[in-house]
Image (tube, coloured by chain):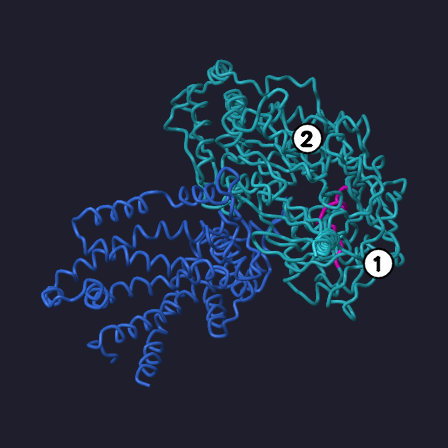
Chain colours: A blue, B cyan
Amino acid sequence: MDTFIYSLRKFFQSIPLIFGVTLISFVLMVYFGPDKTYDLLGKNPTQQQIEEVHHQLGYDQPFLTRYFIFFKEIITFDFGYSDSTGEKVSSIFARTIPVSLAVQLPILISGNIISIILALIAAYFRGKMIDKSVMFVAVIGMSVSYLIIVILFQIIFCSSYGLNIFPVQGWEVESFTSYLKYVTVPVLASVFLSIGYNTRFYRAVIVEEITKDHVRTARAFGTHPLKLLFKNILKNSLIPIMTRIIITLPFIIIAGSIVLESYFSIPGIGLVLYDAILTGDLPIIKAAVTWTAMIYVLSLILTDIMYTVVDPRVTLK
Amino acid sequence: MQKKLFLLFIFCTISTSAFAIKVFKYSVEGTPTSLDPVQSSTKYQNRIVSAICDTLYDYKYLKIPYELKPNLAAALPKISKDGLTYTIQIKKGVFFSDDPAFKGGKGRELTAEDFVYSIKRHFDPKTLPRGAWLWQGRIKGIDDWKTAGSDYKKQVEGLKAIDKYTIQISLVKPYPQLVYTLTKGYSAIVAKEVVEKYGPEISIHPVGSGPWVLGSFNNQKAVLLKNKKYREEIFDLKNEGYDEKIHGFTGIKSLQGKKLPIVDQIEINFMENFSMRWISFTKGSEIQFGFIPEQQFNNVIASRNPLSLNKEYAQKYYFLPQTEFAFRYLNFNMDDPKIGYNKDKELEKKNKALRIAIHKAWDWPQYIKTFFDDLGEAYPGIISPGIDGYDPTLSKEYITHDPEGAKKILKDNGWTAANLPDITYSMVSDIRQNQMYDQFRGWLITIGYPSSKIKKQTFASFGDYSKAVKSRKTMTIAMAWGLDFPDSENVLQLFYGPNSSPGSNNSNYNNPEYNALYEKASTMQPSKERSEIYKKMHKLLLEDSVTIAGFSRTDLWVWHKNVILYPVENVLGNYFKYVDIK
């Protein structure tokens, strides 16, 4: 009950933050964003037609009126229709977010699990060959361009020049098997990349923990290395690790991945957002900003709650 | 037991083949955003829209030069002697495909009134139309109908359904290109019920009477399914312009007498990423149609003249180099007093000399080699070979790199490094455009232009760039124009004074002599006299050096050998119905 009340209180306290974020974003979109009008014109437009499109897009209304409309949209969660495609924004999100999640969640989960395990091993054998090898792989993951990794994985796993066992593009997911068929290579490529950054970060956190007195005491006590790693070290390192993981959730849910979606033809939210930002499709941008702000707030609340789970000394007040 | 297993195997094989559907997996490099006919401004949109919704006319599939044929219309239009009234009969018994928008979910018969309604939508600002320019100021009363509030209940004087199957279009002045406009996706016919049911979402839910119905559509792929209610249309080789010498290698001959559309499903993959597109194409089990990307050129091409594939690829794929139906140009903004018109007539004269000098500095072969795999040749001006008005006798000096000549012109006209104006190259900010700017800068430096006076103006998106162009805020305009129909009027209107920005004349060229010739020619039916006027206009443009043009890219189409097709990626919207899979 306390947790629920805390979450509710925290959420209401964050409402000004959400509106602040939306206001700042709206100012940026209106005054500095691309003008969608010129994307929607025919090949030989007249000044009158330009004004008509301006009017249809609501550009001719005063800023306050436009923000008030946005405000109403936030309250009702109805952001209207995309200026580019004419499709309802809620339908676009409902169609694309699950696809992005289906790709991003396995990346998030497997990428972090593998990184934590590698970081634990590297930290435990700090300065030794294993540590150096893990860090070497991590540095490769960090240094090689994402695009190169994606293309390399496509050639190895998907092309007639390589193993040719997975599709290079498309998303015809009808069953778990077909899901695995389409998701494997994008996940492998992204996990390879994410391992680099995550392992280095987690190793640093774990190394700090490993040098603490309670670990030395446990060692002296003869605790089994596995127990020492998972119970004494990992559990106590979880706060920064969790923060890092949870904080990426809004981006995973709303932002998707532009690179993966464009290179594997995955109909997710990433490319939709990219195009919207580039062309100034305000209804989509407005919805994305609002949803990101809200999920961010929820993620912060979740982070606080999770702190209490992993560290009993933390209380929600 | 063995016999039973054998019989089971045979049964399974027969069943599988009996139920196997033919799917053509096609790919394009661009993504359509809307499938509403009134917004079908790109070739990617046009192709899908005209596959789903019928147009009155179409081009013969294989015929070059392009030739019109009736599609939904029963015959070519009857044109009054004064060229002002077009009477068009449409086919009877054509039905919209089934959709919940119709009573009982069953598509109703398409009538002349549906065509009238579909064209009216271009004059209703709420639909965000992009095709009105084809008919505004041309169809009697259509602009007044819009000014009066676009009330669909009110009639347009020049756009009528005389009866259920007869359309009558009355024009303000003769418009010989009208029939061409009726082949475009813009003129594709939708039903009022569908528009009313789906509102703006008709863009993702078009319903028509064409050979295909939309199965699914997102930003990666569109799936078209065979319209089972499609009218009886039989493929006729002769009528479609088949020529054994040109089309024989494709196997199209075997399509004779087949009912259209032939395959059951078309998958249109939107693949802007060339490396993925090529991997997918060569994989064997994915896309069956694509083009050879620049990066693969040396691996795949065996010879440049004539263009051919190397043995390994030639065994697996059909190949066709095809010149795009578009041209690339660099216009000067004549509204800019530093390069174009000027109140000071002496300076205006000097500006013309400056434009000619820049024109002479332009090195087409180097441009084509750098950015287009050294494929194709430039031609003088904007009228490409094969189109009415093309003049093969035009001097090559308009496309000859002549730095010495440029230097001389600058010197003769009193231009020195000190008094030359800053020249700005405007572009969307991307690597390729930056490279083009650097090349342009290099050419100008060779004619003595001070490096510090050559600048670039960059824009984050094409929309922003377009806004600046339409607001006359750029000094130069580097763009391409895709022809809407095979008539030089479509390119010559790009320099017609009244079409100045924000219209299609982004050079803001306004030459009374040119304008008068355009006005005369634009109402003329194709004739020798009209061709001569076109040539004269074209010459004026080149002499005034308003534009540095032109070049049309060569596309290298490839497709799997189990696919029977002949790529017509230019003006023909809907050629999917002619595709077969072996």
Q: Residue at x 76, y 41 (%)?
A: B180
Q: Quadrant of the N terminus of chain B?
A: bottom right
Q: Position of residue B580 (x, y in %)?
A: 74, 43
Kind of element beneath mark 2 = helix
Whether tag 2 and tag 1 are in contact, CB under 8 A, the answer is: no
**Chain containing mark 2:** B
Q: Position of residue A187 (x, y in %)?
A: 43, 54
- Three-letter amino acid code at the position of disc 2: Tyr
Report, in whole angstroms, how far the alpha carbon at label 2 lies from the one at label 1. Answer: 42 Å
Which picture quadrant has residue B381?
top right
For disc 1, the marked residue is B111
Which picture quadrant has residue B282?
top right
For disc 2, the marked residue is B514
In the image shown, does B111 or A227 lie closer to the viewer? A227
**Chain containing mark 1:** B
Q: Position of residue B562 (x, y in %)?
A: 69, 39
Kind of element beneath mark 1 = loop
Give the residues in magenta: B180-190
- Three-letter amino acid code at the position of disc 1: Thr
**B556 in the magenta segment:** no
| Relative to A133, B342 lies left or right | right
**B187 in the magenta segment:** yes
Which picture quadrant has residue B380?
top right
In the image shown, does B245 or B30 lie closer to the viewer? B245
| Relative to B216, B166 lies left or right | right
Label located before the other in sequence (2 or 1): 1
Within 10 Å of the Cα at label 1, are there few (<14), some (14-19), or many (20+) other Cα atoms? many
Q: Residue at x 32, y 46 (%)?
A: A141
Disc 2 vs disc 1: which is toward the camera?
A: 1
Q: Quadrant of the C terminus of chain B?
A: top right
